[in-house]
Image (spheres, grey):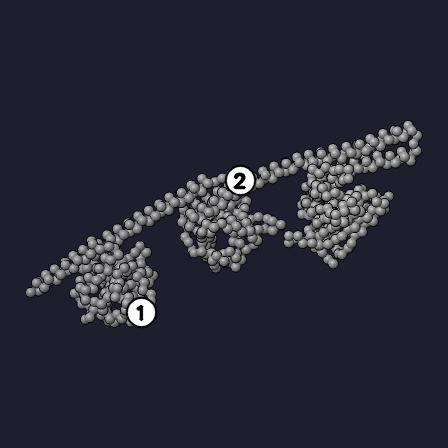
């Protein structure tokens, strides 16, 4: 009779294994684990269980926990994956079963956390293939506890499942690998396409090419932001000029004080290789770099852009999460940073070439201008000298008085002096560029006082009144020694073109605000012959042609204009009395404020 019972058991086992085999052959990967588990639960008459496999990370993945568990379990966290670090210490019966590679069971109840289902008994069997655990089946809560027959049956089932599950897992991994490779290939093709399109779109404009590189690197490295950050100096301050793109491909352009920015330090440190900051949240830059904090940036990766070994910028990507950058992506970032360096070098060369060309053009224009002015004014001087000499000859023949001849000699002497002044003015104009960067603090009131004394001394034989209205005693400006020539030139013109017996010049000082900047306004009001409106607008132009009423003004006032341009100042002329130009002029000078003391 015993052998009959064994035959029944064997037939029943064969039937069960046959059913399991059908499930593996006919059901999808998403449902076969549940169907196998359901069959085991029904066969062994237990309340619930799970059937899981070990993935490539060593985690126990359970696609088939008994579905009825979820409606009864009150714990919110119902994780289908048991991480390796959660079971490998062997603190639980299922963890110990995997670690020790053996069947374990207990017919005693377990203490479970509040909200978990109560476990009265449990049977856990690892699925082993060639001495390696590849999965596990666990069942719980059998009415009369687990017996040897139950253990033998579940072990027979796991032995049977082992090679089938292994084949399934291998196939699954092959599919995942193939899909991964296909995805990588698609990504590679897309990256190659982006790279090709980027370089094919290059133009003769290096700056636009750099922008193309920045936009492309953000896409290629799947970054949240990408930037090209360049250190520049402006008004004696170090600034960072940032051009970039965000994850919506919107262009960003910022110019900020360079202090405290992560890119500033990286550029100045000039590292040889790629620089990566993994956790910017815990760095000092999170307090000093406002952009990092505002955009919640966690990771920086970038390369320094160098020209002839000198660091000038950085080429970087930024992430709001700790994104992993592959070796291939690092290589792309390095290549693109070198491409940016080439474009930056081109940009620098173009600027130098443009500057050189501009300097050459300016030099040519100045030479032509000096030639025209010199020829015009020297011809007038020679004409006056010739006329005076002819008059002397006539007077000698007619016996004119000695006094008349002396007056004519004075005219000749005055014209020689005028010629000397002309040469001096042209020499001064030609050297203006040398003074552009040589500024110092100058007391404006003191400078005006000295200019007034010099002008009065130069025309000692004329009755001259020059009144400087003072509201401040100490006014400091940034200028150089040429500022005296500005004041002297204006007062000389007011005297030379004045037919009055008493020459009057009134100098007013005030401060004005123009487009947000504060200037000292210096007005020279005279009682000279005045300047017609049609001449006023042309008076400070390089091609100004003097007429009989403005003869001699051209070169002096052009000198004044060019000197004031160096100081970021300006000059204009108005009627002293509005609408009545013949009653004198008002020459107005503007100089940037530097400092005052009342």
Q: Residue at coordinates 54% horizontally, 41% vertically from top-left?
A: 347
**SS class of the residue under badge 1?**
loop
Write the residue at 22% across / 59% down: 35
Towards the viewer: 200 or 507: 507
Residue that carries the numbered disc 1 in the rendered image: 74
Residue 176 in percent (x, y) is at: 30, 51
Camera-side residue of 320 and 270? 320
Horizontal and vertical percent position of residue 75: 32, 68
Circle 1 packing at 10 Å, graded few (<14), some (14-19), many (20+), is few
Farthest residue, direction left: 1
Which label number is shown at residue 497? none
Mark 1 or mark 2: whose residue is earlier in sequence: 1
Q: In this view, does 168 lie to the left or right of 488?
A: left
- Kindly state the secondary structure of the residue where label 2 is placed: helix
Q: Residue at x 8, y 64 (%)?
A: 2
Q: Name the residue under label 2.
A: 346
Answer with left or right where residue 536 lies relative to residue 147: right
What x and y, as percent, mark residue 372?
71, 34
Quadrant where the image shows the N terminus = bottom left
Q: Is residue 257 left or right of residue 365?
A: left
Q: Which residue is drawn at 70% across and 43% down?
A: 537
Residue 452 versus residue 481: which sits nearer the camera? 452
Quadrant where the C terminus sits is bottom right
Q: In this view, does 492 lie above or below 512?
A: above
Q: Can the viewer see residue 394?
A: yes
How far apart are the alpha carbons under marks 1 and 2? 68 Å
Figure quadrant of residue 72: bottom left
Extreme front residue here? 579
Q: Where is residue 59 in the image (x, y as percent from the top left)?
A: 31, 58
């Amino acid at each position: 009779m015993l052998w009959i019972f064994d035959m029944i058991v064997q037939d029943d086992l064969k039937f069960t294994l046959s059913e399991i085999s059908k499930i593996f052959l006919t059901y999808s990967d998403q449902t076969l684990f549940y169907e196998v588990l359901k069959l085991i639960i029904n066969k062994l008459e237990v309340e619930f269980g799970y059937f899981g496999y070990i993935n490539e990370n060593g985690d126990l993945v359970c696609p088939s926990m008994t579905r009825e568990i979820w409606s009864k379990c009150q714990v919110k966290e119902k994780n289908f994956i048991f991480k390796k670090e959660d079971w490998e210490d062997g603190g639980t019966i299922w963890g110990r079963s995997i670690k020790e590679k053996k069947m374990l069971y207990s017919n005693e109840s377990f203490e479970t956390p509040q909200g978990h289902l109560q476990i009265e008994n449990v049977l856990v069997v690892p699925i082993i293939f060639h001495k390696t655990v590849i999965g596990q089946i666990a069942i719980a809560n059998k009415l009369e506890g687990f017996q040897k027959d139950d253990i033998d049956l579940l072990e027979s089932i796991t032995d049977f499942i082992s090679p089938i599950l292994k084949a399934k897992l291998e196939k699954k991994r092959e599919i995942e690998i193939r899909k991964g490779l296909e995805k990588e290939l698609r990504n590679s093709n897309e990256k190659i396409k982006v790279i090709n399109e980027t370089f094919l779109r290059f133009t003769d404009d290096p700056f636009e090419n750099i922008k193309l590189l920045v936009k492309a690197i953000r896409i290629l490295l799947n970054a949240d932001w990408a930037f090209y950050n360049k250190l520049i100096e402006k008004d004696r301050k170090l600034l960072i000029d940032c051009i970039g793109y965000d994850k919506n491909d919107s262009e960003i352009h910022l110019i900020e004080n360079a202090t405290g920015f992560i890119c500033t330090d990286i550029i100045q440190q000039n590292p040889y290789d790629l620089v990566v900051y993994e956790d910017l949240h815990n760095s000092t830059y999170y307090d000093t770099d406002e952009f990092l904090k505002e955009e919640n940036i966690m990771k920086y990766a970038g390369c320094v852009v160098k020209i002839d070994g000198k660091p000038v910028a950085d080429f970087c990507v930024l992430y709001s999460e700790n994104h992993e950058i592959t070796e291939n992506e690092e290589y792309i970032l390095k290549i693109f940073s070198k491409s940016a360096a080439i474009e930056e070098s081109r940009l620098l060369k173009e600027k130098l070439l443009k500057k050189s060309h501009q300097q050459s053009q300016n030099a040519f224009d100045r030479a032509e201008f000096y030639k025209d002015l010199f020829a015009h004014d020297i011809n007038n001087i020679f004409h006056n000298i010739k006329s005076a000499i002819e008059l002397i000859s006539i007077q000698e023949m007619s016996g004119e008085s000695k006094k008349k001849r002396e007056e004519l000699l004075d005219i000749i002497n005055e014209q020689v002096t005028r010629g000397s002044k002309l040469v001096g003015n042209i020499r001064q104009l030609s050297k203006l560029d040398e003074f552009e960067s040589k500024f110092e603090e100058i007391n404006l009131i003191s400078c005006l006082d000295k200019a007034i004394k010099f002008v009065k001394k130069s025309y000692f034989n004329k009755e001259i009144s020059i009144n400087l209205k003072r509201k401040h005693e100490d006014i400091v400006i940034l200028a150089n020694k040429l500022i005296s020539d500005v004041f002297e030139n204006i007062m000389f013109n007011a005297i030379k073109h004045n037919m009055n017996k008493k020459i009057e010049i009134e100098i007013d000082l005030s401060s004005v605000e123009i487009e947000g900047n504060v200037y000292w306004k210096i007005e020279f009001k005279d009682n000279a012959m005045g300047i017609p409106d049609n001449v006023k607008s042309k008076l400070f132009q390089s091609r100004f042609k003097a007429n009989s009423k403005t003869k001699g003004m051209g070169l002096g006032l052009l000198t004044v204009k060019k000197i004031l341009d160096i100081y970021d100042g300006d000059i204009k002329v108005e009627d002293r009395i509005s609408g009545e130009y013949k009653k004198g002029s008002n020459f107005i000078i503007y100089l940037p404020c530097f400092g005052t003391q009342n």
